[in-house]
Image: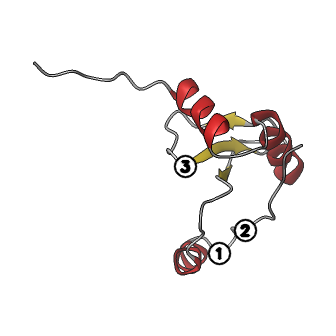
Amino acid sequence: MTTYVVYSFESTIAEFFNSSTTVTRRQCDEFAISLVGGVSTPLEMQGVCSYTVRAGPDKSKIIQFGGEDSIIDMGNISIAKAAHPNSSLAASISGP
């Protein structure tokens, strides 16, 4: 018998904040809004090691927050910057 797990983006987001970082979801949302304005809305599909939102006046910007122990592969950043020249890598934020 096959067992299927139903994906819940809210529980995935909660798990990220409970296990991967000391900052809160609210801090990330506020940081995203401070970067590009508008309203911060989480994407419906979230990664296991990150929290990703759309923000900006027309929700055209995507902001991703990684776990504190996540390593950023600068080679991948270079590829992403070549494909999306108007993108940027923001500073880190810290929790309480």
Q: Nearer the viewer, mark 2 or mark 3?
A: 3
Disc number for residue 13: none
Q: Is 1 placed above or below 19 here? A: above
Q: Nearer the viewer, mark 1 or mark 2?
A: 2
Where does label 2 land, which residue?
A: 89
The 10 Å Cα crowd at callout 2, few under 14, some 14 to 19, many 20 or more, is few
Residue lying furthest left: 1
Q: Is 3 placed above or below 27 here? A: above
Residue visible at 89% across and 43% down in the picture: 96
Give the CA separation, mark 3 to mark 1: 25 Å
Q: Position of residue 47 (x, y in %)?
A: 50, 45
* Contact check, label 2 and label 3, Cβ < 8 Å: no
Disc number for residue 85: 1
Give left or right: position of 48 versus 94. Answer: left
Here the colouring is secondary structure
Residue 4, image quadrant? top left
Pick the front one: 19 or 60: 19
Give the CA separation, mark 1 to mark 2: 11 Å
Give left or right: position of 95 versus 9. Answer: right
Pick the front one: 71 or 59: 71
The amino acid type, in three-letter code, at marker 1 is Pro
The amino acid type, in three-letter code, at marker 3 is Cys
Residue 78, image quadrant? bottom right
Where does label 3 land, which residue?
A: 49
Give left or right: position of 38 versus 11. Answer: right
Q: Is 46 placed above or below 8 here? A: below
